[in-house]
Amino acid sequence: MKIGVLALQGDFSEHITALRKLSVDVFEVRLPSDLKNLDGLIIPGGESTVIGKLATEAGLIAPLQEFGKEHAIWGTCAGAIFLAKYSNEPQPLLSLMDLRIERNAFGRQINSFQEMIDISSMVDKSHVTVPFQAIFIRSPMIRVIEGDVKPLATLSNGTIIAAQQGKILVTTFHPELTDDLRFHQYFLTLVKLCTP
Ligand code: GLN
């Protein structure tokens, strides 16, 4: 399996490290031609405005949109904003997921937090599911999901923090900052389902 990680800005190297632990071939994506032959793509956390600006300059917006029609893409935090249809601020978006998302809705860097979350909806029900450590750093909040977007995980107050629409997966937190590979494994399962 060949997985790309958008490597324009943000914490792409943490995703690359996580994917290597799962023994997949990983490629950094900076140009449209880098998308060739990939089976799936991760868009990392960082600053969605910067990622959007650099992707526009690299001529990547349309190629990424085309890629997302055929392949699985997972966006974490800033990546989730970039995949959404609407953000509360004007910025380049891929519009690949029917989400309304608000940047920095949990507050500033100092308001970064962690919560152990229930991910039993995402894993084999025959096992007791250990909670997942979800790390939020100036995270966006998913305000509205539309169409056939399905929530995968929520905070204890009901806020949706992971969602999926067909081949597109978003998490507003950072699984790549933990040693827990279950979200990366989940994404690879999705990639396999989408690969003919
Ligand atoms: N605050 C960032 C943004 O608006 C996202 C933060 C992150 O990816 N950790 O794009």
Image (spheres, helix red, strand yellow):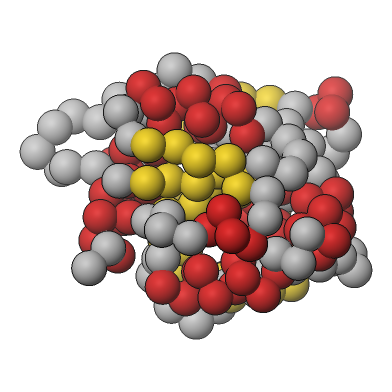
Quick check: can you spot residue 163?
no
Q: Residue furthest bottom?
A: 147
Is 26 located above or below residue 13 in the figure? below
Q: Is residue 36 visible?
A: yes
Question: Where residue 162 sits: x, y (%)?
Answer: 50, 50
Query: Is 175 left or right of 21, judged from the image as shown?
Result: right
In the figure, residue 70 lies in which quadrant? bottom left
**Relative image position of residue 3 (x, y in whole percent):** 42, 46
Considering every residue shown, the one lying at the far left of the view is: 126
Residue furthest toward the front?
Answer: 33
Quadrant the C terminus occupies: bottom left
Find residue 60 and report its horizontal and vertical position in percent.
70, 64
In the rendered structure, the answer to whether residue 188 lies left or right of residue 154 reads left
Relative vertical location of residue 119 with respect to residue 31 in this rendering, above or below: above
Q: Residue at x 76, y 67 (%)?
A: 59
Q: Nearer the viewer, residue 20 or 83?
A: 20
Is 187 situated above or below 59?
Answer: above
The residue depicted at 36 percent of the width and 22 percent of the height is: 21
Residue at image point 90% right, 68% down = 90
Residue located at (87% from left, 34% from top):
108
Tell me where residue 138 appears, x and y as whole percent. Answer: 78, 37
Q: Nearer the viewer, residue 184 or 37?
A: 37
Q: Nearer the viewer, residue 146 or 184?
A: 184
Q: Is residue 20 left or right of residue 142?
A: left
Q: Is residue 118 left or right of residue 9?
A: left
Please tell me whether residue 135 is drawn above or below residue 107 in the rendered image.
Answer: above
